[in-house]
Amino acid sequence: MTINVAMAACPSALILCAAAVLTVAMVSGFMCTRSDRRAAMAVTIVAVAAAFASRQAFKGGVRSLQQDDNSDPFHSELQVLPPMALSVSEYPLLGAGTRMQQNARLPLGIHTRWTSEGERGRYLIELGAPGYLFIWLARLGLLLSLLRPRRTLDRLGHKGAAALAALTMLGRLTFDRVWQALFFLSVGLVLALTTEALEAQRQGEVT
């Protein structure tokens, strides 16, 4: 992962990766035991070794970060906040239409003057401000629904629901099929575990 992020030379990807790792570590109770601390030390050693093994990639990443278009690496990730996204992005108020940011439109000769690499910017261009806000509220609802089983799973020693909820607003659920597949697979596992725990608790109360 360290080598891939460095070769990508994308500040926002690096920030998202670091934020995701730190978020999961904090909400899952990582570093609370001796084995956790040993694992963290092993990861640090591997990361340092990877850095030495890919010095050219890191040099290229540093040069990319010094370019003008990467002068503010936090810019795209701060757009998780609606006021930030609505104020700094260029988009048609009611949207240019769905699929207008997909590459498949280019062979068809369909062009638009708006373009964005970030997922939130694409929401705004395709769906406009109302569509972007609707999707943001839907993701907020998903986050809250994942927080509901947190107490049950925490009691069983599982921190998955809290960690997954923390990633709901950060992930690229629409335009990144890998993230989408892994995220909703994890959601299914969390809900299945919660259902089993509640069923076991109900049967215990009955007996």
Image (cartoon, grey):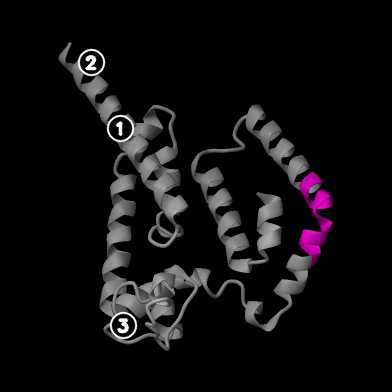
Q: Could you tell me the amino acid type at mark 3?
A: Ala
The mark that comes first in sequence, 2 or 3, is: 3
Q: Residues within 10 Å of mark 2 (few under 14, many from 20)?
A: few
Q: What is the x, y in percent for residue 41?
A: 73, 38
Q: Check residue 107 for magenta coloring.
A: no
Label at residue 96: 3
What residue is drawn where x is 67% and y is 34%?
39
Residue at 70% from the left image edge and 60% from the top image edge: 7
Q: Of helix, strand and loop, which one carries label 3? A: loop
Query: Secondary structure of the magenta portion, mostly?
Result: helix
Residue at the image point whose x is 63% and y is 67% from the top: 10
Q: Nearer the viewer, residue 47 or 58?
A: 58
Q: Secondary structure at mark 1?
A: helix
Q: Give me the C-alpha separation between circle 3 and circle 1.
A: 39 Å
Mark before the other along the chain sequence, 3 or 1: 3
Badge 1 amino acid: Ala
Please state, as top left, top right, bottom left or bottom right, where the C terminus lies in the image: top left
**Total labels drawn:** 3
Q: Position of residue 5 (x, y in %)?
A: 66, 57
Q: Which residues make up the magenta segment?
A: 49-59
Disc 2 marks which residue?
A: 204
Q: Is residue 133 depicted above or below 4 in this figure?
A: below
Q: Which mark is residue 19?
A: none
- Cβ–Cβ under 8 Å for marks 3 and 1: no
Quadrant hosting residue 8: bottom right
Amino acid type of the residue that numbered disc 2 sits on in the rendered structure? Gly
Q: Which residue is mark 1?
A: 192
Residues at marks 1 and 2, CA–CA distance in whole angstroms: 18 Å
Give the residue at the far left of this rendering: 206
Q: Position of residue 31 (x, y in %)?
A: 62, 37
